[in-house]
Image (cartoon, helix red, strand yellow):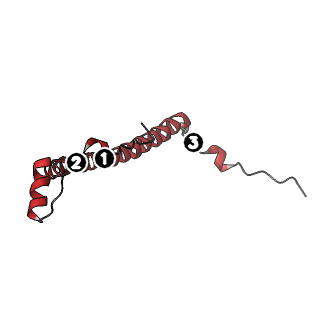
Amino acid sequence: MGKKRKKPNRRRQEVRVPFPTILVGVLTLSVVIGAGYMSINIRCSGLGKQIKLQERELVETQKRLMVEQDKWASRTAPINLERALAHHGLEMEMPESRQVIRIEAPWH
């Protein structure tokens, strides 16, 4: 028996185009950075919308607060208290200064 002849490896004979690994790395990095940027941008846009909505609600609440404070101030004005007492038929007098007890809040 004789020596077997080796068949030439056809894969070695194929022409290979060099694969640009640096280009693939740069493109992959660009895609990752772009996707991250888009994600952050979308999140920031959503938060911006929420902030604007909450600011509008705050302005509306502050307006309602001012209206209610004005109503309370007008109802508790001495002349209006006297009118309410007269309307309900109550005979009350303002206390003298020695009858008033003042309590200070503990946080002052």
Q: On the rendered structure, is 7 left or right of 87?
A: right
SS under mark 2: helix
Instruction: Name the residue rendered at 77%, 51% in the picture.
Output: 6
Name of the residue lying farthest toward the right = 1
For residue 48, which numbered disc appears in the image? Answer: none
Asked if residue 108 is positioned above or below residue 54 in the image, the reply reads above
Which label lies toward us, 3 or 1? 1
If you read the primary sequence from the N terminus, does the residue marked by circle 2 or circle 3 appear first? 3
Front in this rendered view, residue 19 or 38: 38
Instruction: Name the residue rendered at 42%, 45% in the picture.
Output: 35
Mark-to-mark CA distance, 2 and 3: 68 Å
**Which residue has dot 2 on it?**
56
Kind of residue at disc 1: Gln
Q: On the rendered structure, is 98 left or right of 24?
A: left
Name of the residue lying farthest toward the bottom = 88
If you read the primary sequence from the N terminus, does the residue marked by circle 3 or circle 1 appear first? 3
If you read the primary sequence from the N terminus, does the residue marked by circle 1 or circle 2 appear first? 2
Which label lies toward us, 1 or 2? 1
**Which residue has dot 1 on it?**
99
**Which residue has dot 3 on it?**
15
Instruction: Name the residue rendered at 18%, 46% in the picture.
Output: 66
Figure quadrant of the N terminus: bottom right
Q: Are marks 1 and 2 in contact (CB under 8 Å)?
A: no
SS under mark 1: helix
Mark-to-mark CA distance, 3 and 1: 109 Å
Rendering coords of residue 98 (x, y %) = 31, 42
SS under mark 3: loop
Rendering coords of residue 105 (x, y %) = 41, 42
Neighbor class of circle 2 (other Cα within 10 Å; few <14, some 14-19, many 20+) is few
Rendering coords of residue 40 (x, y %) = 40, 43
Kind of residue at disc 2: Arg
